Amino acid sequence: MEDFRRTYQRMCKEGGVEVQESVLAQLQETRGSSRLDLSGQSLSVDTCSVLGKVFQKDTVFTEVSLSDCMLSEEGAKVLLSGLFANMTVKVLDLKGNNLRSTAAEVLGKLLARNKTLKRLVLEWNAVGIWDEAFSMFCEGLASNSVLTHLDLRNNQINHQGAAELALSLRRNSSLQVLDLRWNNIGLLGGRSLLEAVQQNKTLTHLEIAGNNIPSDTLRALEQAIKHNSDKQSTVRESRKRTQVLSREIRQLKEEKGRQFLNLMETIDKQREEMGHSSRSTSLHVGQLQEALNERKSAVNSITAKLQMTEAALALAEQKNHNLGELLARIKTEREEQREQQSKERKKEQEEVVLRESKLLREIQNTTDTNLQLKNKVEEMERRCKTQQQQIFELKQELTNSTAELKLRLAQAEDRLEMEKRRTKQALEDMDSLRQKEVDHLNRHLEESERTLQERIFKLEGQRIQLEEELSRAKAACVTERAQAEEELGKVRTQVRLEEQQHVASLEEKLRSVRQSRQEVQVHCSQQKQTIADLQAKNSQKCIELDGLRRRIEELQQELSAKDQEKVAEVARVKVELQEQIGHLQAERTAQGGLKGKISALEREMKALTSNHREAILDKESELASLLEKLRLREAEIQRMREDEAQRASYLQSAILTYVQGSSLGHYGSPKK
């Protein structure tokens, strides 16, 4: 720390630059720590150049914070160029410095040359304004292999910048966390990022809220990020397992070596003991031979004592015999010990072989499990790809509608000045349009009520016809079975034709409802634009909108009530049909002689009722799905309104902060 402060003062003196007291005070406060915090200090170009030269040779600080320092383009360029050759700084914070084109280019060069920086914070800057400079930054990021955390919040990145960033992510293999909140990426940028994330396998955390990206792409991005994190976790687990297995194998090998060394030591010891015992026996034999020689010389010299010598010889022979028996016993014991040792060695070798076979089986099992996991991962990827393709195919209509809305928004922004002059006329026109829309909705509801009543009458007519046909079939079931079958075929064809006509009418009505909904959405978008432009002046519009929303809710409640009535009527018809079936079954029990002939007709009637039930259930499910789609469309419209209001508020706040920051930077620059 003292070396850094001294070098800073020395470089200031050599370059003829005034020493900034605030920087010196901050350096004195941060003694004994590896973090340099200069946030909030207004650094001039000269101080930035001196700090850049000092950072070239610095080996103390690992974290540097330069947030809200009002750095100019030249100052940022000089300071960041000093960090090209730095080998200690791992965290760099440049939040709120309004960095633009030249700073973005220098940052790209920094990422391409520096090999130690792991975290870079660029929140509240303007790096994404100039496409060429941001492309240079993205090239540096693509060539970097160390950076793991990158924060690009509120940097005015558009869809082209997102495409460049996606290209860099395809080439990068080290970035793990990326924060892109509160930019202007849009639909195209979200798709390009989705393609890049699907190819990148290291990015495990992505923040992308507040970028006007549809919910389907956000969900797809979340799934891709989750897939990457799952892959990383599986890879880590497999690495851990392989490390554990390798450690166990090493331990087993070491144990085998130790056991082998112990066996060799025991064998050596036994050999030494055998040599020692053989030496002792040879010494005893030599001593005995010397005694015999002495005794022989005594016999030759003293012939008078032959009896004594013979007795001594007999005793010596007995001793020799005993010694021979001892030698034989020792040999047998040695052979037994050798056999035991050989058996123990064989047992140990068998145990070692069993352990090795067990380890090989475990390794094979782990490899099989890894292959199964890989196959499962590939199947999941294929399923994800098919699901994503289906989602993109299903939601092309939404993309077209959003594109049209954006075009209309652009046209509306061009016509704002003309509409300001015609506000009064627009208000009157809006009132008339609202009244027309209400009338149109009322007419549409009346038409739907009429159609529902017509459907009910048709169902009653069909029920009456079916009852008549049943009575005719019962009367002529004995004599005219063929005629009954023909009539049933005709009834089936008529029912199918009526169902097809009914389905066609339902589709036409649904198309008309969709067209009316689209018209209402267009009118609502126009109203939203006029209200967003004249919020301060036209507070009465909010009250009128609340009234319209209440009317729409009342209409929706009426629609739900009518749907409930329709369901109740269908249930009543089902109950009546069930009662009729019960009466038919009672009559069938009464007519015992005609059971076999009438059973076929009843089966056909049951099939018809089941078909009718299935058709009714299908229609109910279709109506429910249509209602859910309408609700989802309304929720998406409300979400788009809220997103546009938030964007407008964020743009206003950003413009105010930019204006205030530029004014403060212009008037509050330090004097040299």
Image (cartoon, helix red, strand yellow):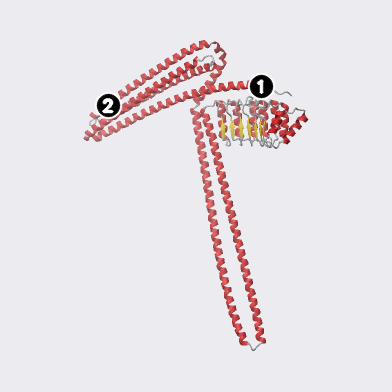
Relative vertical location of residue 369 with respect to residue 357 in this rendering, above or below: above
Residue 508 seen in this snapshot: no
Q: Nearer the viewer, residue 657 or 643?
A: 657
Q: Residue at x 53, y 46 (%)?
A: 367
Label 1 Cα neighbours within 10 Å, binned few <14 / some 14-19 / many ≥20 = few
At a point 52% along the width and 42% down the height, the residue shown is 373
Residue drawn where x is 54% and y is 13% of the image: 419
Say whether disc 1 or disc 2 marks the residue closer to the N-terminus: 2
User: From the viewer's perspective, is 68 left or right of 13?
Assistant: left
Badge number at residue 522: none
Q: Nearer the viewer, residue 197 or 316?
A: 316
Judged from the image, the secondary structure of the residue bearing numbered disc 1 is helix
The amino acid marked with disc number 2 is: Glu
Q: Splitting the image into 4 quarters, where does residue 469 fall?
A: top left
Residue position for label 1: 664
Quadrant of the rendered image containing residue 141: top right
Percent of width and height locating residue 641? 51, 22
Residue 525 spot, x, y in % from top left: 50, 19
Q: Name the one closer to the observer, 317 or 109.
A: 317
Q: Answer above or below: position of 233 versus 155.
A: below
Instruction: Please name the residue shown 55% across and 11% down the image.
Output: 421
Element marked by disc 2:
helix
Mark nearest the camera among 1 and 2 is: 1
Image quadrant holding the N terminus, namely: top right
Q: Nearer the viewer, residue 181 or 597?
A: 181
Residue picked out by circle 2: 467
Query: How many discs mark residues in the rendered view?
Result: 2
Amino acid type of the residue tagged 1 in the rendering = Leu
2 horizontally vs 171: left or right? right
Q: Find the distance from the CA under tag 1 to the CA under tag 2.
A: 89 Å
Relative to 173, is 48 on the left or the right? right
Measured as percent of width and height from the top left, residue 33 is found at: 67, 36
